[in-house]
Every structure is written in C-alpha cells, then in structure tokens.
Amino acid sequence: MATMTMYPDDERLPRGERAAFNLYAVSAVVLFVLMMLIGLVMRTAQGEWMSVPPNLFYQLLSMHGAGMVGTMGMVTTAVMWFFLRKYVKLHLWAFLANYLLFLLGALCIIGAVFLGGYAALWTFLYPLPVHAMAMWSGGAAAWFLVGYLLIGVGMLLFYLDAAWAIIQRFGNLGRALGLQWLFGGEIDPNHPKAVVASTMVIIANVLGILAGAVVLVLSLIDVADPQIAFNALVMKNLIYWFGHMYINATIYMAVIAVYELLPRYTGRPYPISRPFLWSWAASCVFVIVVFPHHLLMDYAQPRWLAIMGQIVSYGAGFSVFLITAWGALTNIHRSGMRWTMPSRLMVLAMFGWAAGIVPAILDGTIAINRVMHNTQWVPGHFHFYLLLGVLPMALALIYHVIGSREHAPPNSGADRIGFPLYLLGGLIFTFAFLDAGHLSVARRMATHLPEWQGTDHMGAIGALLVVLAMLYFMARIALGLLRANPDARAAHPAR
Amino acid sequence: MVYQNVVWVIALVGMGLVALGFLYIISQVGRPADADAVRGINRRSARWRLTLFIILLLGFLGASYGTLHSFPIPAQSGPLAASQVVNVVGRQWSWQMSIEGQPAGDTLHLVTGSPVEFRVTSADVNHGFAIYAPDGRIAIQTQAMPGFDNKILYTFTAPGKYMVRCLEYCGLGHAPMVTEFDVTNPTGG
Ligand SMILES: [Cu+2]
C-alpha cells in the first residue's frame, strides 16, 4: 500500500533538487501576483474606475493570457516532477533546462509585448499577428512566437526525459497508463497514480506541443512574408488543438498533488482502481479530440467535428465528477482530517474543478455556444477551474513542502485569514464573469457599455481580494521556502 | 423567456448541487469513522457513484438528443431558401452589410417572421459577427473568417433596432466595431 508517512524520505529534496523546486515555486508565485495585478487593472479599466488606452489594454491582455498559461504550465510541471521522480529516474538537467527555456521564452514575450507593442493575444490567431494596423511590428510578433517556441521546447525536453524514464521502468507508455488492467487482471495496488497521470499528460501534451510548433513556424513564415496565405480554418484548428491541450495538461499535472497528498492528510488509503484507470485512459483520448468545442461558431467546420466537440465535452465531465472529485470526497468523508493549508487548498481545488466544469460543459453545447461564445461566460468558467482548481492544487504542494521543513502542516493565523480571503475573492471574481456572460457582455473588449459596468465593478472587487490574498501567499511561500532549515526533518506519521 | 436566463439557472443549479455535496462532506469531516464505518462508507460511496453515473448518463444522452436532433447550425453547402439574403463582410474595423441584389450603403431593413440568411466573411483577420437583440442580449452569432462564408439562418420575431458587435478580438478597433439595422413587422402581409 501507499506510504502513509506525511513527509516520506523518498520525497526529500537534496541540494540541487531543492534549489530547482524553490526556483519554480517562487518564480511562479511572483509571476502569478504580477499577472493577477494586470487582470485587476483590466477589470478596473473596463468598469471605468481607471483609464487605460486601448492599445495598452490589449497589450496587457496578451501578457496576462500568455503569462498565466505559461506560468500554470511551469508550476504544474514542478508538481509532476516532484512526485514522478519517486518512481522513475528523472534527470535534474531536463527539469532545469525547462526552467531556463521558460525564462528565456518569458523574456521574449515580455519584450514583444512591452517593447514591441505586440497585442494579438495569447492565441496569436492567424492572420492577426501580421495585420497589426501599425500597433506592433512583424518583429514584435516574431519575438512573441519565438518565446512560445522556447517554452515549448523546454517542456518537450522535460516530457521526453520523463517518457524515457517511464519506459525504462514500465516497458511502454500503455503499461504505465495501466491499459493491461482495463478489462481484467489483478491491478498492482502499488502502481502509482502519479505515473498514470504523468503518462497521460506526456502523450497528450507532446502531441499538443508538436501541433503548436507547426502552427508557430507557419505563423513565423507568415511574418517573414505576409503575402503567403494559409488556410485560416486549418490554422485555427491547430492553434486550439495546441492551446486546449497545453492548458488542460496543467490540470492533469496538478491533480497528482491531490492523489499523492490527500490520503496522508485524511490518514486513509486512496487505492488505485479499475474505474480510475478507465477514467484516465478515456481522458487521454478525450483531451486530444475535444478541441473542436472551441470552433463551434465556425460554421464552415465539418459538422461531425462540431458534434464530436459537444459529445466529448460532455464525456469529459464523467471522469472529473465520478472519479477524481467523488474519490476525493469519499476519502475525506468522516476522516477526521485536520484543516491546515494543504488540506483546505486540496478541498477547494476539487470543488473548483468540479463546479467549474458545469458552465464549461454548458458552453460546449452548440445550441448554447451560439449565445455564450466569446462572452465573458468563457473567462468565467476557465478562471473558475484555474483560479479555484489548478492554482490551489499547486499551492497545496508548495505549502506541504513548507510544512515538511517546519515539521507540521502550515496553519498560521495569517493563513487562516488568507485562505478565506482568496476563496471569497475568487468566487466574487468568477461569478462576476459568469453573470456578465449571462448578460451577453463581450469578452476581450477594452471598453464596455455603461450597462455592462456593474459586472466589471464586482469583478474588480473580487480581483482585488484575490490579489491581496495572493500577495500574502507569495510572501509566506518565499519566506517559507527560502528561510527554513532544509536538513531538519524527521519522519512524521500521517495526521 | 430569455434563453440566456435559462442557461444561467441550469448553471447555478448544477454548481449549487456540487457545492452542497462538498458542504455535506465538509460538515462530516470532524466525525472520524472507525475501520468498520470506513468499510460502510466505501461500500455506499461505490453504490451512490453508480447511481450518479446512471443519472449523468441519462442526462447526457437526453441533452445530446435534445440539442442535436434538429442541428443548430444550418447546412453550409447549397441554398438555404431564405426570403432575405444579407451579405456581410467584416474588416478592421467596420461591418459592411448589404441585401443581395441591392447596392450597399443604405441602412438595412429586415422583416420579422420570415427566415433571413446572413453570408458572413472577412476581408482581413477573424472577426465575430454577433447580432444583439433590442433587449441587449445576443440573438445569434458566427465567426467571420477570411476565405470562408459562414451562413446563419435566423428568423426575427421581435421588431426593433438590432446591434452588430464584433466578438472575435481583431486589434485596436475591436470594441467600437459595431453597426446596426432595423427589423420591422411586414407591411400589408
Ligand atoms: Cu473584433
């Protein structure tokens, strides 16, 4: 059975590993705070509580989107690395190379946006990057695209190292996913959930990043010679195939923290099961083929693709509700779990993911998408499961690591204020978006009609609360990770 | 009944049910179960999960049938047999709308009760062609994409002033990229 030790020895962070993990965690919380501040500025500007010229607004929007998606990818990679390294032999250089390439890529993107004026958003939707109407130059677009390529190459390196290590131990990716147990046979109770999830992410996101590389190179060719025209519908399919898998991979990497940590906090085993393996095998297929739900309003798209997008969106909900959220709730039920920062964050994360799926599935319905597409309903649902789902999963691990250095799960008085502030702010912020979507408020607009601004004001207030809580988390995490004596540790029994 | 309000209620009920489930479990955390009770919890959890699976599956099949059996997007190849056809071209940052067979430029007048076909395309980048009803809610939309014609088939039921807004980000002038048209009840009919 899985170990029930709170801070097991095989999760120790030796010198190099500790430095790497600290780099990832501290960079991530700092970047999150900066990107959230940008978000706060945008919501305040839309509500006309502050004046931001449209060109700057769209630069900020591009920075916020690319920055948030990239940082989510970066910090959740650290979650996957933290646990996967216990089961297979990962190379530290691959993990560090990913970090360095991420930083280089981030610098290119920041330069493209703030020096070059790039404002074609994180989706760089063809052919907008070369139709800037004098807002930015081809050079700025190229720097942005190159930034993405660098980040993608880093992630690919990390995944290839992880895939190689997994194959070394389990023979092939199918056996690591547990496909041999789908239809029968005795499931190895020690088969790690972290390996199942990591393998799924590797398969899906390597495909996604390769699709991304193709469309990034095509876009760069377009920048070099705007006379060259590609099929806009094919380009859009590639972009959303890449974008969808990249951001969804962050959820599947981050949830490893819940699988691994939750049983230690509840003191109850959280065994692997056949439904679990089925759900991950199905999710692997679903996440690869669900992307057409982003193109439901492209009527020129073949009809079967749109239908597939809707049906698979529905299907993807099953594993979230019935396996991950249900399994976690069963594990928590009457467990006597103590409320500390990691346990609070994990329960919030499960709620954010499960509840955020509801408006997402509705929007994946073609008939509903006709009136919700590109309204603020969309940022409403993805902020719901990113802000209240994925980020809390990553924070849960970081807080857990701080706890391993302090010999007890963190639960200071300030933590007990910071957490509800984050929760309350997050709910106000996301429901302001959803309400706006229900009122047909368009997303991605620098200026809003007066009748839309009530929702902007609610969003700005929620965002302010989230920023305050996150500022506190940032300080707490930076001090907790950098200050504590890393060698002082002892094995602690669960709970 | 405004369509968006129905969707909003479904979303709130669904998210509310998820929240209730979590609140119930959270309320029970402080009552630790012994080993026997844990076995009972696991048994009941598996049974309830099967029930929930069946409920979700039925809901999923019902919703799929209900929303797809008459497909919400008109066939894109071949004529749509609409009595009024409007050609729409989006460009950075304006809309050009003209009734088929009439010169462009005049304010557009459409009538209620008979289907209108909008043939939507773009002269440069992607735009989103969204029709806002007089009550301020989106009635219908499609993407305006260079190189493609996306066809909407829509029957107006309420007369009034309709706004067209761009719903796909297209650069600096995206938010002000609007136009409007009138819909009136047919006269003499
Ligand atoms: Cu636009």
Image: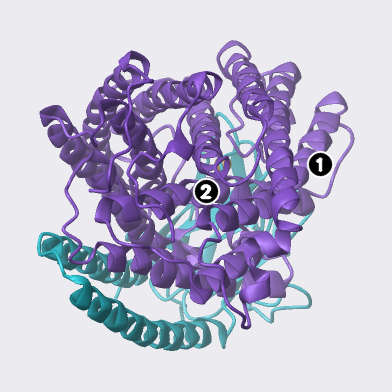
Chain colours: A purple, B cyan
Residue A171 lies in quadrant:
bottom right
Residue A334 lies in quadrant:
bottom left
Query: Mark 2: which secondary structure?
Result: loop
Residue B133 percent location from the top left of the image: 40, 62
Relative to A1, is A391 above or below?
above
Q: Is mark 2 within 8 Å of ligand 1?
A: yes
Q: Residue at x 66, y 59 (%)?
A: A176
Q: Chain under label 2?
A: B
Question: Residue type at mark 1?
Answer: Val
Q: In the displayed structure, does residue B117 sit left or right of residue A403?
A: right
Q: Residue at x 22, y 33 (%)?
A: A410
Relative to A390, is B28 above or below?
below
- Label 1 or label 2, whichever lies nearer to me, is 1
Residue A197 lies in quadrant:
bottom right
* Pick the front one: A262 or A153: A262
Does the CB distance between marks 1 and 2 fall below 8 Å?
A: no
Residue behind mark 2: B167
Q: Residue at x 36, y 32 (%)?
A: A401
Distance of mark 1 from mark 2, alpha carbons? Answer: 27 Å
Give the quadrant of ligand 1: top right
Number of callouts: 2
Residue B150 seen in the figure: no
* Pick the front one: B15 or A178: A178
Q: Chain under label 1?
A: A
Residue A213 seen in the figure: yes
Question: Is disc 2 surrounded by few (<14), some (14 to 19) or many (20+) residues within 10 Å?
Answer: many
